[in-house]
Amino acid sequence: MKNLSIKQLLLLTGFVLFNLANPHISVAQVADMQFINGDPLPDAPELAQRGKYKIGVRTMEIIHMDQLDILNSKEGNEVRYDRRLKLEIWYPAIIPQGQNDLITYAENRGVQGDPKKPFIQYSFSGRALRDAAPVTGDEPFPLIIVSHGYVGSRLLMSYLTENLASKGYVVVSIDHLESTYNDAGGFQSTLLNRSNDILFVLGQVAEMSKPGSSNFLSGIVDATNTGLIGYSMGGYGVLNAAGAGYSAQIIKMFGALAGGSKAIEVLTAGNPEYIKRHDDRIKAVVAFAPWGMERGAWDSESLKGLSVPVFFVAGSQDDVSGYEKGTKAIFTGAVNSDRYLLTYVNARHNVAPNPPPAESLKPGLPFDFYYHYAEPSWDQRRINNINQHFVTAFLGIQLKKMEYGKYLEVGEISNLKTWTGFKPRTSVGLELVHTLPVQ
């Protein structure tokens, strides 16, 4: 008993008290009743509830071969390398009777032996079965590709990825090389490779899903019907992958890095190579606090290339990506897109991730570990539920042609009248604006 963690003590105390009042309920049943990232709170809006499918999850690695190694190339000596991308894939699955579908996701951060970046191992629970057999016989499921922030991981938004998979999507989340907790490298790698990674993953999943493929995704994914979700630098990446070519200003961010200016120029608006990259399999985008507008990554002209529907999410006090001159400016400038902007009033940047892990509550750990996830003015679990609700509505309309319009066509200011799908008096502190594309 001496070395129990805070989390273990809380769970043990809760179990003892609960079991005294409910002696007929087993330990396994109590474990299943604990709050898990993404579970609906009592005030969760309607579409935050899980869908009809149980879900499976698998981890996979793919390799994007012979790419420019922007961080190690020198003048006159271009270095090429293979980009290894680890994927986490959630999908509708068959859960055998009596099988427990609680899963533990493992993460670690920091560097062993570095006091400035202490090495922290932690875990959190989810509701999925590792390597479960996929549901077959239904129509192929739409594909959703998820891109994390810098730094981050493929597990950063598991509350949302699990939720969407339960509603009939195959959800693929990427560990972007040189941009994760374990291998964070120079920022230029993220600037250059983010949208490249996303489009490469789309192409690879399309191949895996073809009938006759030996991959478990064969026949269950409709890659021609794809949505992209990105947070922060992931938002920067999904917008570029969907048609928002960067402005010429981004070239200056590469300085004298060998080959950098030429490589990033391929991703700028109007560049013939960028125009050829257009992928009409991408039907919708969700961009949480996308980074870059305040730094000149886009301008009014380059944003005109974004024509797919986009659902933007931002905090009104975002001090990383910016709000008025950041996400809101992208929303305003994307004049050819049918677009929404959901604003968490008084929130800062963390409008997308899971809640802080239990380990972040331990004394002596860096404050930044906790604040990488937490919001000062909002309960992160509440944000998660609201995100589940609105992303379900938006992607349901765009990818499944569902009749969810009533959940999005609500009053602009939530304080004035309870929004459709919210319990009475609970839709406060939110704003939602919808703008149609110019004719």
Image: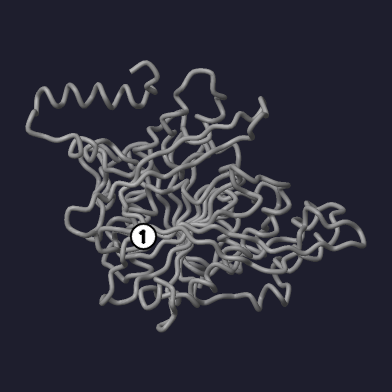
Residue 29 picture location, percent across and down: 17, 39
Q: Which residue is mark 1?
A: 131
- Which residue is at 71% across, 72% downward? 270
As drawn, 37 above or below 146: above
Query: Against 307, is 235 above or below?
Result: above
Question: Residue 81 location in percent, x, y?
Answer: 73, 63
Q: Is residue 321 visible?
A: no
Query: Residue 74: in sight, yes or no?
Result: yes
322 shown above or below 405: above
Left or right for 209, reference 393: right
Q: Residue at x 21, y 60 (%)?
A: 96
Q: Position of residue 51 (x, y in %)?
A: 25, 57
State the residue in front, 33 or 368: 33
Outermost residue toward the top? 2
User: The disc labelled 1 sits on which kind of residue?
Assistant: Asp
Farthest residue, direction bottom: 212
Toward the left, the furthest residue is 24
